[in-house]
Image (cartoon, rainbow, N blue to C red):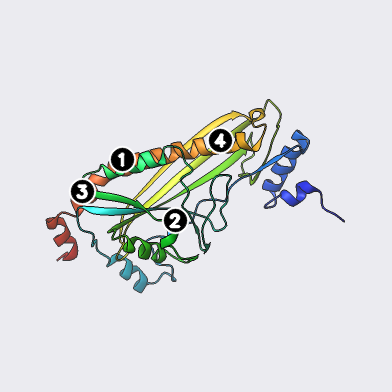
Amino acid sequence: MEQNPIHRLLRGTGMRGAALLIGAALCGCASTYAVPGRGAEMRMFGAERDQLSDGSVVKTLSKRPLAELPTTIAVVRVQSSGYSSATAQGWGSGAYSVVTQRDIENQEDKLKEIRKLPMVSDVAPLNRLLLPTEFHSDLELRQAAASLHADMLLVYTLDTTFNVEDVAAPLTVVSLGLSPNQVAHVGCTASAVLLDTRNGYVYGLAEATERQSQLASGWTNEAAVDQTRRRVEAKAFEKLVTGFETSWPSIVQNLTPTRRAAMLDPR
């Protein structure tokens, strides 16, 4: 028996599928907006991927900062494998993909703010010419950063979810033209990790969240939904950069000659 078009659009089962069916019924199946893929799994960056054991833990703890000041920071955005939105497409396959399009408002301006930080000589976004087509860990990104002679690598991801009313499960397909009394909630968590290009030493972590709500009836077409997504993601990214700026002085302090010597020789 041929499946209903709505059934073919569903991604996932259980509560998520029920939520989608309800949304489709309310809007009369007029139109849908496919939500982009999720954020990348940030635990794989700067951590050992093999089975946790005493040896792997010791190996991770033995890493020491090797960056020199002033430093160049390479920047890259990662998302889940197969990520796709109306304004950006993930590059590569494997454990994650890389987004090189600058589709978030004011993103370039925020990167310029990082350039102004003390002891930062430059900020260099990674592009496809430096990247392989398959990704397994942070190693591929650190190799690309090394080709730019960047001592540090800032890796970040955006994890955006859409919810309508009291439905707790994130939606992967948003039905348009929902009832006027329904409120749509959009949330984005931006996460980042600052790595040493040479050995993957983790200098610091940052995270920021932005949430916005609006009447679902305002989503009359895909462009309106996507505009909301980009607005929320832009705000989350802005907060993330602000958090990074706040933590940067302590990172610089740990790289002063005296502190570096103590970390390299903790005796």
Please give left or right for residue 148 compared with residue 256 in the image: right
Q: Quick one: SS at disc 3?
A: loop
Residue kind at label 3, given as amino acid type: Met
- Marks 3 and 2 sit apart, C-alpha to C-alpha, by 26 Å
Label 4 residue SS: helix
Q: Is residue 44 visible?
A: no
Pointer 4 or 2: first along the chain: 2
Tag shown at residue 113: 1
Badge nearest the viewer, 3 or 2:
3
Pick out the residue farthest to the right. Answer: 1
From the image, tell me which residue sits under label 2.
42
Visible in this render: residue 45? Answer: yes
Mark 3 near mark 1, Cβ–Cβ under 8 Å?
A: no
Q: Position of residue 250 (x, y in %)?
A: 23, 47
State how far apart marks 4 and 2 are (Cα). Answer: 26 Å
Q: Which residue is mark 4?
A: 227
Taking the view exactly as shown, the residue that stands out farthest to the bottom is 55
Q: Badge 2: few (under 14), some or many (20 or more) residues near its Cα, within 10 Å?
A: some
- Judging depth in this view, the residue of 26 and 93 nearest the camera is 93
Q: Secondary structure at mark 1?
A: helix
Give the residue number, with chain letter if any, for mark 3: 119
For the N terminus, the quadrant is: bottom right
Amino acid type, callout 4? Gln
Quarter-of-image position of residue 260: bottom left
N-terminal of the pair, mark 3 or mark 1, is: 1
How far apart marks 3 and 4 lie (CA) works out to 36 Å
Sequence-first disc among 3 and 4: 3
Ranked by sequence position, the earlier of labels 3 and 2 is 2
| Residue 156 location (% of width, % of height) | 42, 51
Label 4 crowd bin: few (<14), some (14–19), many (20+), radius 10 Å: few
- Give the left or right position of residue 143, taking residue 172 as reference: left
User: Which corner quadrant of the image does residue 139 belong to?
Assistant: bottom left
